[in-house]
Amino acid sequence: MRILLVEDHLSLAESVAQALKGEGWTVDVINDGIAADLALASEEYALAILDVGLPRMDGFEILARLRERGNRLPVLMLTARGEVKDRVQGLNLGADDYLAKPFELTELEARVKALLRRSVLGGERQQRCGPLVYDLNTRRFTLDNEPLTLTSREQAVLGILIARPGRVMSKEQLASQVFGLDEEASPEAIEIYIHRLRKKLETSAVRIITFRGLGYLLEFSGA
C-alpha cells in the first residue's frame, strides 16, 4: 500500500517515513502544501498523513480541496496545535483521525493500521483468498497456516491483489502502488514479481490469473 506523508519538518518526516517503510508500506514524502495537493490530485494512495503547518498551502486547505474533488481517501492529520478548535476544524473538513505532536511512532503506526483496516478491509483484521491469509496488523501472509516468506515488493504486489477480490489489476496500476514518486515505476518489474509469487503459491490452489492486455487477478480454485 502506498502512503503520502506531507510534513515540512525534515527530520520528523524522515523518522516517520522510515518507520512506515519498516512496516512494508511504500511512502512518498512531500514537504510543500501545493506539491502535496498536486500529488493527491494525480496519484493513487491508500492513506494520507497531513501536517497542518505547511509552506504555501496548509493541511486544512489540502484536506478541503481533496474532499471537494470527491476523494474519500483516509486522512490522518498531524499538528503541533493541540487546541480543541483545530481538532474540530480538521474533523469537520473530513479528516479521519488527528494526532498532536509530539507523538510516539508506535502510536502513529497503530493509527495508520486502524485507518487502513477500516478503509481497505472494511474493518476486518484479515483478508483471505482460500488458504492464503493476510493479517493487516502484523502485515504478514500465511499459506495453509504457515508463514509465507516474501520480499517487500512481492508482499506489496500480493497485498494489492488480495485486497481487491474479483478485480483485475493492470501492471500500471500495480506499479503505481508499489513504487514511490522517487522511484521509476516499472510495469516490467511487476511481471518479475508476479512470476516469483506464482512460484511461491504453486503448491496451493491459489492462483494469479493473467488476463492478456488487462492485468492480473488473484483467485482460489479449490473446492
Image (spheres, rainbow, N blue to C red):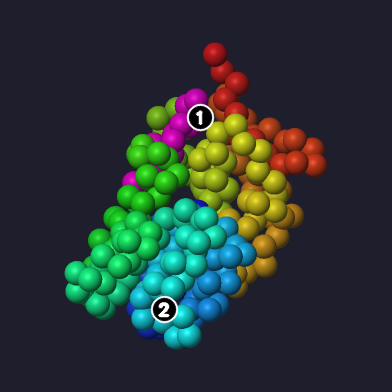
Tell me, yes or no, whether the two marked residues, 1 and 2, touch with CB atoms within 8 Å: no
Secondary structure under the numbered disc 1 in the rendered image: strand
- Magenta residues span 126-139
**Front position among marks 1 and 2:** 2
Indicate which disc, 1 or 2, sits on the residue closer to the N terminus.
2
Residue 58 is labelled as 2
Residue 108 quadrant: bottom left
In the displayed structure, does residue 57 sit left or right of residue 102? right
Q: Secondary structure at mark 2?
A: loop
Residue 84 left/right relative to 68? left
- Comparing 43 with 172, the one in front is 43
Q: Which residue is mark 1?
A: 129
Please name the amino acid that badge 1 sits on.
Cys
Q: In the image, 39: left or right of 124? A: right
Amino acid on which the number 2 mark rests in the picture: Asp
Please name the residue shown 47% across and 55% down the image.
73
Please indicate, yes or no, whether residue 2 appears anywhere in the rendered image.
Answer: no
The answer to whether residue 138 is magenta is yes
Q: Position of residue 147 (x, y in %)?
A: 42, 38
Label 2 neighbourhood size at 10 Å, few (<14), some (14-19), many (20+)? some
